[in-house]
Amino acid sequence: MSSWRDNLIKTEPYVAGEQPKGGKFIKLNANENPYPPSPMVEKAIAGFRAAGLNKYPDANVAPLCEALAKRAGVDTDNVFAGNGSDEVLALAFRAFFNSELPVLFADVTYSFYPVWCENMGIRYECIPLDDAFNYKAEDYARPNGGVVICNPNAPTTIGRDLDFIRSVLDANRDSVVIVDEAYVDFGGVSSLPLLSEYDNLLVVQTFSKSRSMAGMRIGCAFGSKELIAALRAAKDSYNSYPLDSVAIAAGIASVSDESYFADTVGKITATRDRLTGALRDMGAELPDSSTNFVFARFPGHSAVDIYNALKTKGIYVRYFNKPRIDDRLRITIGTDEETDMLIENLRRILGNNC
Ligand SMILES: *Cc1c(COP(=O)(O)O)cnc(C)c1O
């Protein structure tokens, strides 16, 4: 006897950081920005004409893509925008990864990549990073159905230079290479300048981290006209109108405020470097971060115990119960006050032989 239950989706979904409700807590577990978005965004939303909501938004999100294109120095038809880079990445997997060969990505990287592959029936192969969590370009010089590089990588925090991306691209003239730049604004090197040389490169960015707009859901991609057209085809086979009118207005406002953006990113990177020093003083080991989070191990202490001890103090960080990284914590950079609280509590916890 078969049941409708046999036909339900079997994919193991991606699990995001917890979103604790109520009470006072310090949330350093989802790489969110601790600062509000630009005041221009506040103004754009407050002044938004609700009467205009009777009309569908521009299917290609043209006004936002124009603003993004101008900033990146490319044409509007080299830009795609969607509901967060998660949606953009999912559509890119659908649009580009239709080969019988496996898509390649690292073993320690954004854990949504294998989830999309499972969900869409895409073959994939996870390639181990080296012992210091570095990508090795030669690992990506083998037959494949596509490549996804997260740069700077999450959760490792390590960024690679353009020589590395160029070697991957040179070895993969016949596959699409996606570079996920969710954290690039915090100290990474963007692959945008390579777009003019490689028509198989897609660079994906988000407004969720450096632009403090995780709640608005805006992500974007830059690539050749052919890749962007394929992304639009994938989107239009699924939902014609993914980004809403309010998000488009808010996104344009954010892109228009370059100085606020630079200030916020500057504050976060300064706090990050201070936290990195404090953690090393406590004996923690962590690579220099090019992102808005750190990834630390605490020799002699169990990461999950520290995670739980911090949680009882109302401080949420991210622990991954996964091979190779279950001895580490991923800690988002908060405000200076939040970071002080974190440091103080960590000192106490580590002093208690946790
Ligand atoms: C946060 C994140 C994303 C997705 O962010 P959106 O909020 O969907 O734009 C994509 N890739 C990586 C590596 C991330 O950390």
Image (cartoon, grey):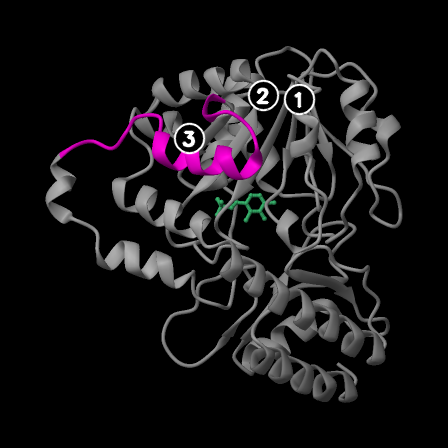
Disc with the residue nearer the chain's start (3 vs 2) = 3
Front residue of this view, candidates 283 and 337:
337
Q: Amino acid at mark 1?
A: Ser
Residue 305 drawn at (x, y percent) = 69, 73
Q: Which residue is mark 1?
A: 196
Find out whether residue 73 is within the magenta segment: yes
Q: Residues within 10 Å of mark 3 (few under 14, many from 20)?
A: few
Q: In the image, what residue occupies the spot 44% across and 53% down?
A: 214
Residue at screen point 51% across, 68% down:
34
Q: Which residue is depicted at the point 82% across and 72% down?
A: 284
Report the front residue among 332 and 272: 272
Q: Is residue 283 visible?
A: yes
**Label 1 CB-ligand 1 distance < 8 A:** no
Residue 47 placement, left or right of 88? left
Classify 10 Å Cα crowding around label 1: few (below 14), some (14-19), many (20 and above): few
Left or right of residue 208: residue 308: right
